[in-house]
Image (spheres, grey):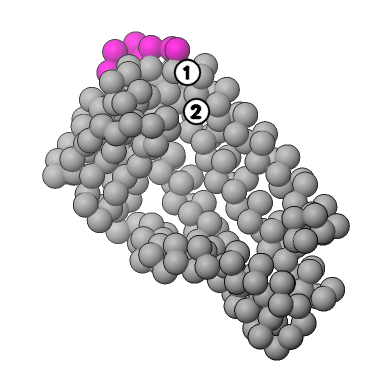
């Protein structure tokens, strides 16, 4: 069986890294969610202020449920903030809101990596959902021509998902950089609060690096199985 194959050793370092990244983001968020920013600005207020000052007054802000479910929807030009971020005046909340504002600014400026990611996202979503079923069915069918075809197709689809995650990295890092600059330039936070904001956003960015590492490790493992079988 795939999951119990000896090639799982390729996954272990990446999985450890992913667990470390998740622990780090939880630690940073928990710490700075308890620290109120000195201006008492909520996440929603920070996002509205930054959007308006960047000529993006047409972007709506909506409150949604869920923890760390915050995101910017470029198709509908809507920023959705979790209730904890929307109503909270902590350093963590304004940092997350500013990060999502960074995505809205990227969209408004036509930032190329974001444009590429948004263009390929629907296709990648489809092929990534098909990759594992094709791989497992191909593996089950063994070395038959049909099995090899399905397995190779699964590898191709999985590569598409890896490429998508690789493109996501500069998008997320750039949004975090914009967030820090915007919060300081527009006086959302004081200089001495910038360190906490950077820690929250750096930890969040690390989770994307970990996700890519796990996907690459999985791809190496899949290729190792293909070469062996």
Q: Name, please, the residue furthest toward the bottom.
A: 145
Quarter occupied by residue 177: top left
Q: Earlier in the sequence, mark 1 or mark 2?
A: 1
User: In the image, is 106 to the left or to the right of 201?
Assistant: left
Residue 47 drawn at (x, y percent):
26, 32
Asked whether residue 129 appears in the rendered view, the answer is yes
Q: Which mark is residue 32?
A: 1
Asked whether residue 185 appears in the rendered view, the answer is no
Distance from disc 1 to disc 2, alpha carbons, whole Å, reads 7 Å
Residue 207 drawn at (x, y percent):
57, 41
Q: Residues within 10 Å of mark 1 (few under 14, many from 20)?
A: some
Q: Quadrant of the N terminus?
A: bottom right
Quarter occupied by residue 210: top right
At a point 32% along the width and 17% down the height, the residue shown is: 89
Residue 164 drawn at (x, y percent):
50, 61
Q: Name, please, the residue furthest toward the front.
A: 141
Label 1 SS: helix
The one nearer the camera, 197 or 168, is 168
Residue 154 drawn at (x, y percent):
61, 72
Q: Name, please, the residue furthest toward the left.
A: 58
Q: Would you place residue 121 above or below residue 92 in this image?
A: below
At a point 57% along the width and 62% down the height, the residue shown is: 162
Residue range (magenta): 34-41
Residue tagged 2: 200
At a point 60% along the width and 53% down the height, the residue shown is: 212
Q: Is residue 7 magenta?
A: no
Q: Main secondary structure of the magenta part?
A: loop
The one nearer the camera, 145 or 87, is 145
Task: Confirm or deny contact between disc 1 and disc 2 (CB under 8 A).
Answer: yes
Label 2 SS: helix
């Amino acid at each position: 069986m795939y999951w119990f194959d000896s090639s799982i050793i390729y996954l272990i370092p990446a999985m450890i890294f992913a667990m470390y990244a998740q622990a780090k983001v939880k630690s940073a968020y928990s710490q700075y969610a308890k620290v109120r920013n000195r201006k008492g600005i909520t996440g929603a207020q920070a996002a509205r202020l930054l959007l308006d000052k960047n000529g993006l007054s047409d972007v709506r802000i909506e409150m949604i449920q869920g923890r760390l479910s915050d995101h910017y929807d470029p198709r509908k030009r809507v920023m959705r903030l979790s209730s904890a971020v929307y109503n909270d005046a902590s350093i963590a909340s304004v940092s997350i809101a500013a990060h999502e504002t960074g995505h809205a600014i990227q969209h408004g400026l036509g930032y190329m990596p974001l444009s590429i990611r948004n263009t390929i996202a629907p296709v990648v979503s489809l092929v990534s959902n098909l990759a594992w079923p094709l791989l497992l069915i191909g593996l089950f069918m063994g070395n038959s021509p049909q099995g090899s075809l399905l397995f190779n197709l699964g590898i191709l689809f999985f590569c598409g998902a890896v490429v998508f995650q690789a493109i996501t990295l500069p998008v997320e890092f750039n949004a975090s950089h914009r967030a820090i600059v915007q919060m300081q330039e527009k006086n959302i936070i004081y200089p001495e609060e910038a360190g906490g904001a950077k820690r929250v956003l750096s930890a969040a960015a690390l989770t994307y690096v970990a996700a890519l590492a796990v996907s690459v490790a999985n791809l190496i493992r899949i290729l190792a199985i293909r070469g062996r079988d």
